[in-house]
Amino acid sequence: MRYKILLLLITIGAVLELAAQGRVKLTGRVYDSDNQPIELATVRVAGTTMGTMTDLKGEYQLSIPAGDSIVVIYSCLGYREEQRQLLNLTKDVSLSVRLNKNSKMLNEVVVATHRRQTSTLQTIDTKDLKLMPDASGGSIEAMLTTFAGVNSSNELSSQYSVRGGNFDENIVYINGIEVYRPLTVRSGQQEGLSIINPDMVGAVGFSSGGFSAEYGDKMSSVLDIIYKHPQAFEGSVSASFLGATASIGQSTKKFSQLHGIRYKTNSTLLSSLDTKGEYEPSFFDYQTYLTYKFAPKWEASFLGNIAINDYKFTPHERNTSFGTATNAKQFKVYFDGGERDKFETYFGALSLNFFPDKYTQWALMTSAFVTNELVTYDISGQYWLDELADTGDGEGTENTGALGVGTYHEHARNRLKASVIATSIKGATKLGQNELKWGFTHQYEQIYDRVREWEMRDSAGYSLPHTGQSVEMIYNLFSRQDMDSHRLSAYLQDTYRLRTLWGRFIFTGGLRASYWGFNKETLVSPRASVTFIPAANEQITTRLAGGLYYQAPFYKELRDTVCDASNNYVVQLNRNVKSQRSIHIVLGGDYSFRALDRPFKFTAELYYKKLDNLIPYEIDNLRVWYSGQNEAKGYAAGIDLKLFGQFVPGVDSWLTFSLMKTQEEIGGVKLPRPTDQRYSVGLYFQDYVPRFPKYKFSLRAILADGLPVGSPRKGRQAGYFRAPAYKRIDIGASRLLVGGEDKLLQKGIFRNLKSVWIGIDVFNLFDISNVNSYYWVTDISNAQYAVPNYLTRRQINLRLSIDF
């Protein structure tokens, strides 16, 4: 019996050895015309059931019989199928294939299908970004605000809220490194340029919830930016009434460099505000991205940024009319003094990348972020709040009496310095159908904060608030804080792809853990998602994602404002504050179809977020005031819908619609959260003149519910109302000149230009007075009046963009 078993084992071993000798390995990469990897492309052997799919890097591996002559078919939704014939295979073969988009030319306009979304992180095409009319100067964030679930009610700012979160709940990466924005910006007038330079962007990924463990500890969204590697010498320059930009790139076999410089001034936009005066904003930004391949498997890169934002403002007067036809009011102010703010940020990141084989990558990264922020103002004003009545003779209104008369003085001397130094090691490897990712980060944070600000008001000879016993400020705040801390984080994640008779599955699961030395808190965050593409209809993709997400405090969340016996407000840091927590559940799907012989994609996502350990906050313009205490719980729930496609043949447009409700409970009282916008509609539409396709047209429209507003320093608990809905339409028209085609670009130095765009924009086409925030006036009887701070009105912008 033993000899029979031994003989059987020897026979099986011999068969396996012969089988192994009788097969060869086919490996390679599938990529597009821009040399970008194509994920989930199908690689199969014609006439057989043998096949596989490419991974995130576009790579594949397939075992096939030796000695055969086969035809390998490469295909993917949205791309033309390619075939390769391999004759008499006797050894392993490496074969990379480029797939071209499934397109046809229509009057020089490309008609194409769309890339499949296999996770909650959607890929964003930015090729038409320069055509988008945008009052903030052409930012990635302006495009995001037309997406479902993303809101912004301030065209002067690049900040946005996602599914009921605030500005601080969005994490932004550039080349895998987390980047930050200034901490003390109070308004869009001061903010300046986004840290993302659109001229340098190569790829954009965005997730509005349910993102994977490789992304950090934020509760709302992820914006993942990858800067491009120039393939040859390239450059661009642009200029408009809002500023100017320039970029240049160059590459060799080992070295590549990309530089971008931007200047922005929004003084023409600010001149349309109700407050008239001398606006002198000056925003400057320089960025560089360098890569050097000093060995076949080693590459070093450097990303650097210098941003200097200077804002000067000398107000003269303000005249604001508001209310209804039967309850009209007018607010007049005459000013003295001025404001001077300066925000300097410096960022640098050095990365060392090692590629031991084509399936594995290691990266060692160190980065430093430094910000130096100064906010100073001394502004006094004499104000009148009057009630108006219709004269009845058709000639307008008349003043029927003063509701409030007074003088105020606002003062601030605020300085904040912060530095963040981070060191990370990350890795990624492919093992069969598994793709593993892991990383570890140590972060050191240091913050220096000095705040001295107050406001005094005098109304009809009485200091406000009027107590009859003492002279008090209506508001004051003092802070003198220094803190430094260490933060550790790590993640492990696996993505597994499975092909069955029912369809294709993509499973992603991961675990993220972190520790912060300031409050001695350890967090563990499990996250998972599954995507299914049915074999019966590959035009449909369904996704389910969820996990535990934390909003780890940085600095502003720690600031607990306490009132002393003298009615002075002092900032203290709360060492007992814990991370806010959110449990995400996201169910969504895509359906790709053709209508009118054009490609479209409909996307729908349902989500629910259970929130606890919340730190309540109030929003005033861009300033987020936290209570400094974990004293609330709540939820956010909604549905996001998006129709993406070619409403006009050859150009992409999209229409989005969102319904959302977010609520919190503070001390047993249920209130809408400050970012509770129940509905929003976004539209980005492109068109061209049919017989002259180089004449382009684009439209950007937003309609969003108003935010809940409460009186300052009392909060929504004392009562709230909703601001009017935010309504805005921006349009742009442009003419394209193409090198080698247009006569103007065939002469002299113009022959070296690839293209020239000449355009005109009309911002706020219908001249709608949108409300950004409120200025509160209190009379001697302690009655309060909310005076709206309106945003910009209609403006015209001319722009010129040149690519070479």
Image (cartoon, rainbow, N blue to C red):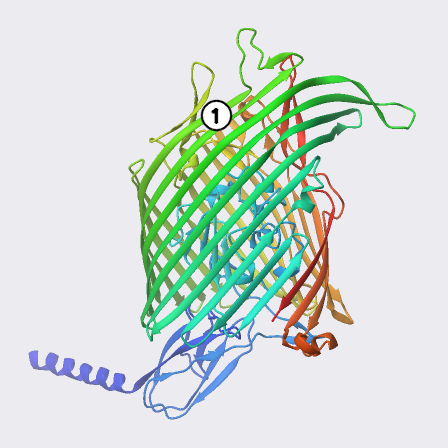
Judging depth in this view, the residue of 276 and 291 nearest the camera is 276
Question: Is 163 placed left or right of 631 in the picture?
Answer: right
Q: Looking at the picture, how far across and down is residue 315, in whole percent?
A: 66, 33
Pointer 1: residues within 10 angstroms few (<14), some, or many (20+)? some
Q: Is residue 686 visible?
A: yes
Q: Residue at x 55, y 64 (%)?
A: 247
Judging depth in this view, the residue of 499 and 609 nearest the camera is 609
Q: Residue at x 51, y 59 (%)?
A: 204
The quarter of the displayed image where residue 554 is located: top left
Q: Which residue is mark 1?
A: 477
Judging depth in this view, the residue of 601 and 763 nearest the camera is 763
Q: Looking at the picture, how far across and down is residue 447, in whole percent?
A: 38, 39
Q: Looking at the picture, how far across and down is residue 517, in whole percent?
A: 29, 39
Point out the residue furthest to the bottom here.
Answer: 88
Placement of the C terminus among the 4 image quadrants: bottom right
Question: Is 421 placed left or right of 636 in the picture?
Answer: left
Element under disc 1: strand
Residue type beneath disc 1 = Leu
Q: In the rendered view, would you say 250 is above or below 705?
A: below
Q: Residue at x 59, y 59 (%)?
A: 245
Q: Is residue 538 visible?
A: no
Q: In the rendered view, would you say 306 is above or below 270?
A: below
Point out the residue furthest to the left here.
Answer: 2
Q: In the rendered view, would you say 438 is above or below 417?
A: below
The quarter of the displayed image where residue 357 is located: bottom left
Placement of the N terminus among the 4 image quadrants: bottom left
Question: Is 427 placed left or right of 302 in the picture?
Answer: left
Question: Is 668 placed left or right of 512 in the picture?
Answer: right
The quarter of the displayed image where residue 10 is located: bottom left
Point out the residue furthest to the right here.
Answer: 393
